């Protein structure tokens, strides 16, 4: 198991190196060239000269790349044009918000998707089956930000059940030791703050979680359909085990294997979707910040965030692979 | 398909014989009246019809089946794939696929009508009174649950053992089926077991509740022949000891003859014949059983049989003479394989682990005389297919050389290679993957002609039709696609395609293994006839010794990449020199059948 | 496929007693001489889901192509400019059946022109992705070994960035134009197609018929072109259909992020949806209408793609 983790971590290195080369090339391919891209509206000949010297633009490309890589290793991902703060700092302060949002979305997707898919497969042809198909179709055909609009319009603007924007009501005064607002509220025993933060997460969470919900439900349905017709399930029935055990130990557990992999892949979708959802709800996570950077052509932020998001995505999939190994003994075997 | 004139008469004759069949299993009760034998009846199937819902409406998989199984008796249901034999067995267990249902008739188990009992009662019966040993050990164990736990669960849920002492019992059960080191093995997962061990575990599972009736569905057909016999012995020993009645489902007449008291023959959903094993096999009544018997792996050489049929005694004499005087035939060796080895490198699983060599073929030499049939026999992994691929020039030998008609194979340039392809053609095992699904039969047979610029369109058409005629395919079938053909028809197409360029050597890699026995016999007959007419040379790669006996002149036995025995078919079969060959021969089911007839 | 209509009878002369799952069973219709694609077509024609999808797609394509005829106003015309006030955006009327937007554009006309824009982006970007993906997949599947390894690592790299972010960064290089959006969405599809085709070709290469074809003396090129490739394109065609749906949605997302250039009043569904954000409380129809157009179009392509996948599935093919 440890070997698997180490191996996967080692495989991350060439991936990140490749990605850094691409992003290094990307900045140079931007319209106006790298200096313009790094300075944006703050462009002055002096600043340009400074940047040029820092990036060593007069040197050959491999040397420039080497310097870029060295800066990355020191945690220097560049400086945001919008805020003037280091990109890494911007990422770290905003990331907890996005984690909170992603967790809510995943809980929504898994909490509804798996039971829905399971029941749909077990009662093939029933109303639940048909509704699962409809849900999974809606999930993949409705644009995330359109869904976010609609939810916001109905439940926040018209009905007023949830707040329309932000992470926290303007009137709320709370301390934030970790930047995970719900967690902060619980830690400092400011219950109303925790509740308020949670309410702010519900609508964006649902909007963001709908696509993964559709995919998880669909995958679960397919996996359960296949597993329940597997030979070993028939054999298990032939030995007379109780239906409850058949469901929990044979069908559900085996069906979860492909679903777990699918959930890992959804994180990529969630991070994409967060850019749109956070923008609609003016929710200050990495997504809305990145969307803003796109608007304002804040290339250092785009460059840094894409690299950091790829790292997060790869790590999440590593965790998924490891947990897959926990369920499937075939992967647990040591060579 | 319902208006089968023979069906009724067979049934009438079959029922009385079933009653008297007790004689074989319990000699002492042979004199008993019908009344007491009724008491002994474990299972009685009455006019059973099973339907499957399909897109095109209900399809009847089993119609009007009648059979009885008595205590301690083994009843074999014999039939080809699709004959409804497994469906019948699954109906008994109440485990039909979700689109299947019992349409008519009754299944009496002891005093209960299984069609009327509640699902709860049925679940209770399974695992206590009814047991199953399924067909494929690779798919019938839950891959992510420990073997022991899979058996524990049944014991606990059936109230046979408590959670605490279930494992002790499981270990006993695994021990009983001959699994070494059962306690440690019980904590392992299926992927850590070999096929034979898995099947043993499944037998332990099937017998864990000490059922009165065990359904054994092709219990060994997925295993290598040498493993099969041991498992079957274990199974019959145990059921005899426990007095378990067995419903044995098999496609193998030899196996049925050897293991069963009563044989039930099914064909297209109908029971066409049943009775005491010996009687059904020695004096088959129904046309289908007769065909099945005629096609059953016979120890008489098919070639000799064909010669005899035609009254060509000279051919026979020639064949026999050729066996005796090998030295004179040496001048006409078509293929000569000299000390050939093949090493595959296997990439290590780890990131930095080195690749290791795996020797698939290890120093093999053989000669194939022109116009003869040489068979290479071995179990899976023996290297026989790799050898065939090297002769086909698909794989290159690591060391050693292969010569064909005096020229070294694989030595020339691209042109020589293409010329070689015209002279050597393969027929592969799986008729479902050896034809391109997008090509019609006509295009498939025409393809080699086009590739080698054979005549114009009209000439090619004439040649394709000639070939189709040779392999007994009708003109209408030329327009069809592989998915629309049966396995036997596909294999005919593959043979026609192989013959298109008039090759000298045809390499048949398990060419008949995937076919049902009647079709298998037809294809072998076709191949023998073609050899006679076209003067072909065959290299037969197979795991099936019965096939070898039917078609080959010489045979090589391979084990783990080496040739362990070589000789004429007669000498190898009559006096095997190595223990391995003897084990292979012993493993042929129904060897005794031949003696009985 | 003229043989389709031939009344070929099922029972072969040589094996009258043989049965197999492929034999003509009770109630089974005989479709002699029918290839894989013909069979898939027959399955599709009977599938109501496929028909619904096809109708949606047909309507969408018709509207897009006939936009100049159907739309009452031009795509960039603002006929109601004088009637719109910041506080009041006129709703449906006789003159403007779906009302006006805040720039004074006729919503109906803009939706119709938007269909054309979506079709163009969808088809072009999918073609772009398909061509690139097929090229890479073919190279990898053909040469194998180190070429395959290099291409697959590149594909891994592209897939390691969430798709929208990849599209955004490519659009940033390609500049502010609708072409940039097409290229961005197309590039995102490349690794998907490449991986799909390669996997599919690899699976086919292992089949006996490919081995048999090379043993017949066919060159590697003709084995690849006449056997491996035609048998591998099924999943790729399915994916292309589904990609059309994704492209329409992704194009809207890129517009939402301000990419693609042009006026904010451009007749394009994503742009309309983005602009409507400001008036959500005043005129929700401005958001709902283009949103529904995007969803329904994506639904149409998805239904067709999924039905096609089902019809081509070999597991369904062998089952009678």
Image: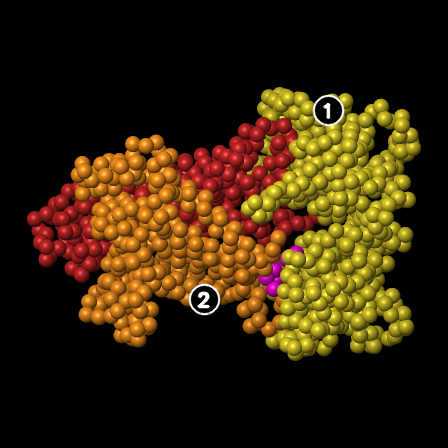
Asked if marks 1 and 2 touch (Cβ < 8 Å), the reply is: no
Residue C314 appears in the figure: yes
Q: From the image, state the color of chain A.
A: orange
Left or right, residue C53 beside residue C104: right
Give the image location of residue B327, x and y in percent: 89, 28
What residue did someone put label 2 on?
A115
Q: From the image, state the color of chain B.
A: yellow
Give the image location of residue A223, x and y in percent: 51, 59
* Same chain assignment for discs 1 and 2: no
Q: Quadrant of residue C190?
A: top left
Q: Residue at x 65, y 42 (%)?
A: B356
B144 falls in the magenta region: yes
Q: Residue at x 43, y 38 (%)?
A: C133
Secondary structure beneath dot 2 equals helix
Give the image location of residue B96, x and y in percent: 62, 64
* Closer to the camera in the image, B216 or B88: B216
Tell me the tag on residue C180: none
Left or right, residue B431 beside residue A321: right
Q: Identify the chain of the residue marked 2, using the numbered disc in the image.
A: A
A247 falls in the magenta region: no
Task: State the separation of the CA atoms marked 1 and 2.
Answer: 65 Å
Q: Residue at x 43, y 52 (%)?
A: A314
Q: From the image, state the color of chain C.
A: red
What residue did someone put label 1 on?
B408
* Closer to the camera in the image, C277 or C120: C277
Q: Identify the chain of the residue marked 1, using the numbered disc in the image.
A: B
Secondary structure beneath dot 1 equals strand
- Seen in the picture, residue A64 relative to B410 is either above or below; the reply is below
Give the image location of residue B53, x and y in percent: 57, 60
Report the span colored magenta. B138-145
- Seen in the picture, residue C178 relative to B183 is either above or below; the reply is above
Q: Residues within 10 Å of mark 2 (few under 14, many from 20)?
A: some
């Amino acid at each position: 198991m440890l070997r698997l983790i180490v191996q996967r971590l080692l495989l991350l290195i060439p991936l990140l190196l490749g990605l850094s080369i691409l992003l290094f090339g990307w900045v140079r391919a931007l319209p106006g060239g790298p200096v313009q891209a790094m300075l944006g509206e703050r462009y002055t000949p002096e600043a340009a000269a400074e940047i040029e010297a820092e990036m060593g633009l007069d040197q050959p490309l491999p040397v420039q790349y080497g310097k870029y890589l060295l800066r990355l290793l020191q945690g220097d991902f560049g400086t945001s044009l919008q805020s003037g703060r280091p990109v890494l700092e911007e990422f770290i302060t905003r990331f907890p918000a996005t984690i909170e949002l992603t967790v809510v979305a995943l809980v929504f997707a898994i909490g509804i998707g798996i039971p829905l898919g399971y029941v749909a497969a077990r009662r093939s042809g029933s109303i639940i089956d048909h509704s699962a198909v409809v849900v999974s179709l809606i999930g993949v055909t409705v644009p995330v930000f359109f869904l976010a609009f609609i939810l916001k319009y109905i439940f926040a603007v018209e009905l007023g059940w949830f707040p329309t924007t932000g992470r926290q009501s303007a009137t709320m005064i709370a301390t934030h030791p970790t930047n995970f607002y719900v967690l902060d509220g619980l830690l400092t025993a400011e219950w109303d703050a925790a509740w308020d933060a949670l309410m702010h997460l519900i609508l964006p969470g649902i909007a963001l979680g709908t696509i993964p919900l559709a995919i998880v439900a669909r995958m679960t349905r397919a996996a359960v359909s296949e597993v329940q017709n597997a030979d070993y399930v028939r054999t298990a029935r032939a030995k007379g085990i109780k239906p409850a055990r058949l469901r929990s130990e044979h069908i559900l557990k085996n069906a979860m294997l492909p679903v777990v992999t699918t959930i890992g892949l959804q994180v990529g979708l969630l991070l994409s979707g967060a850019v749109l959802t956070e923008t609609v709800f003016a929710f200050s996570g990495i997504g809305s910040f990145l969307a803003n950077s796109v608007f304002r052509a804040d290339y250092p932020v785009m460059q840094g965030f894409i690299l950091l998001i790829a790292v997060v995505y790869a790590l999440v999939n590593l965790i998924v692979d490891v947990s897959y190994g926990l369920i499937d003994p075939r992967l647990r075997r040591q060579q | 398909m319902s208006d089968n004139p023979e069906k009724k008469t067979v049934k009438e004759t079959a029922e009385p014989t079933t009653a008297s069949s007790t004689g074989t299993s319990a000699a002492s009760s042979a004199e008993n009246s019908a009344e007491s034998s009724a008491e002994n009846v474990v299972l009685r199937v009455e006019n059973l019809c099973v339907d499957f819902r399909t897109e095109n409406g209900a399809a009847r998989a089993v119609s009007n089946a009648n059979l009885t199984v008595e205590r301690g008796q083994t009843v074999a249901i014999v039939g080809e794939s699709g004959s409804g034999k497994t469906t019948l067995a699954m109906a008994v267990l109440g485990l039909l696929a979700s689109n299947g249902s019992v349409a008519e008739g009754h299944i009496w188990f002891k005093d209960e009508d299984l069609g009327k009992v509640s699902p709860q009662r049925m679940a209770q019966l399974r695992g206590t009174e009814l047991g199953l040993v399924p067909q494929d050990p690779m798919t019938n164990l839950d891959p992510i649950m420990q073997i022991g736990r899979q058996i524990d669960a049944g014991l606990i849920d059936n109230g046979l053992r408590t959670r605490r002492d279930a494992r002790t019992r499981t270990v006993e059960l695994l021990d009983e089926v001959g699994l070494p080191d059962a306690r440690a093995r019980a904590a392992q997962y299926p992927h850590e077991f070999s096929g034979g061990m898995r099947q043993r575990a499944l037998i332990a599972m099937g017998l864990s509740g000490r059922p009165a009736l065990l359904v054994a569905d092709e219990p060994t057909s997925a295993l290598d022949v040498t493993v099969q016999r041991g498992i079957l012995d274990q199974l019959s020993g145990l059921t005899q000891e426990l007095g378990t009645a067995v419903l044995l489902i098999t496609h193998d007449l030899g196996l049925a003859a050897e293991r069963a008291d009563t044989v039930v023959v099914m064909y297209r959903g109908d029971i066409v014949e049943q009775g005491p094993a010996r009687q059904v096999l020695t004096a088959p009544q129904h046309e289908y059983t007769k065909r099945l018997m005629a096609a059953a792996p016979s120890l008489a050489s098919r070639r000799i049989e064909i010669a005899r049929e035609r009254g060509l005694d000279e051919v026979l004499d020639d064949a026999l003479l050729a066996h005796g005087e090998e030295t004179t035939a040496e001048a006409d060796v078509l293929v000569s394989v000299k000390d050939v080895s093949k090493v595959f490198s296997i990439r290590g699983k780890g990131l930095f682990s080195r690749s290791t060599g795996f020797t698939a073929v290890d120093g093999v030499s053989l000669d194939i005389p022109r116009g003869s049939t040489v068979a290479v026999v071995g179990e899976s992994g023996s290297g026989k297919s790799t050898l065939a691929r090297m002769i086909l020039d698909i794989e290159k030998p690591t060391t050693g050389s292969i010569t064909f008609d005096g020229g070294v194979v694989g030595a020339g340039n691209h042109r020589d290679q293409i010329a070689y392809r015209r002279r050597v053609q393969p027929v592969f095992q799986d008729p479902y993957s050896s034809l391109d699904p997008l090509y019609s039969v006509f295009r498939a047979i025409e393809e080699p002609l086009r590739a080698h610029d054979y005549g114009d369109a009209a000439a090619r058409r004439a040649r394709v039709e000639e070939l189709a005629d040779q392999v007994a395919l009708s003109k209408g079938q030329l327009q069809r696609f592989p998915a629309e053909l049966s396995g036997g028809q596909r294999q005919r197409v593959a043979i026609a395609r192989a013959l298109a360029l008039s090759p000298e050597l045809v390499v048949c890699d398990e060419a008949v293994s995937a076919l049902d026995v009647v079709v298998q016999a037809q294809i072998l007959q076709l191949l023998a006839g073609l050899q006679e007419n076209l003067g072909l040379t065959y290299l037969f790669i197979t795991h099936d010794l019965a096939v070898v006996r039917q078609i080959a002149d010489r045979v090589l036995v391979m084990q783990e990449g080496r040739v362990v025995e070589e000789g004429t078919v007669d000498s190898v079969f009559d006096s095997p020199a190595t223990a391995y060959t003897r084990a292979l021969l012993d493993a042929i089911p129904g060897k005794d059948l031949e003696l009985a007839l | 496929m003229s043989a389709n209509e031939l009344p070929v009878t099922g029972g072969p002369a040589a094996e009258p007693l043989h049965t197999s799952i492929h034999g003509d069973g009770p109630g089974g219709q005989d479709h002699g001489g029918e290839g894989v694609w013909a069979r898939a077509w027959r399955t599709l024609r009977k599938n109501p889901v496929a028909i619904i999808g096809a109708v949606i797609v047909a309507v969408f394509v018709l509207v897009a192509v006939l936009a100049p005829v159907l739309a009452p106003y031009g795509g960039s015309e603002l006929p109601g400019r004088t009637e719109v006030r910041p506080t009041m955006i006129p709703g449906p009327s006789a003159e403007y059946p779906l009302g006006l937007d805040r720039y004074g554009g006729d919503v109906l006309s803009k939706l119709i022109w938007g269909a054309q824009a979506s079709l163009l982006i969808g088809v072009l970007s999918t073609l772009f992705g398909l061509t690139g993906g097929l090229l890479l997949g073919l190279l990898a599947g053909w040469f194998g070994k180190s070429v395959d390894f290099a291409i697959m690592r590149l594909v891994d790299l592209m897939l390691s960035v969430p798709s929208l972010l990849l599209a955004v960064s490519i659009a940033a290089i390609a500049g502010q134009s609708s072409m940039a959006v097409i290229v961005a969405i197309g590039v995102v599809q490349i690794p998907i197609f490449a991986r799909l085709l390669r996997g599919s070709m690899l699976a086919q290469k292992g089949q006996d018929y490919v081995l048999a074809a090379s043993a017949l003396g066919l060159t590697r090129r003709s084995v690849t072109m006449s056997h491996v490739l035609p048998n591998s394109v099924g999943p790729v065609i399915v994916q292309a259909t589904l990609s059309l749906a994704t492209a329409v949605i992704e194009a809207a997302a890129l517009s939402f992020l301000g990419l693609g250039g042009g006026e904010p009043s451009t007749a394009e569904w994503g742009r309309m949806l983005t602009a409507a954000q400001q008036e959500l409380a005043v005129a929700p129809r401005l958001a709902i209408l283009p949103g529904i157009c995007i969803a329904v179009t994506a639904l149409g392509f998805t239904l067709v793609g999924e039905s096609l996948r089902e019809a081509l599935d070999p597991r369904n093919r062998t089952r009678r």
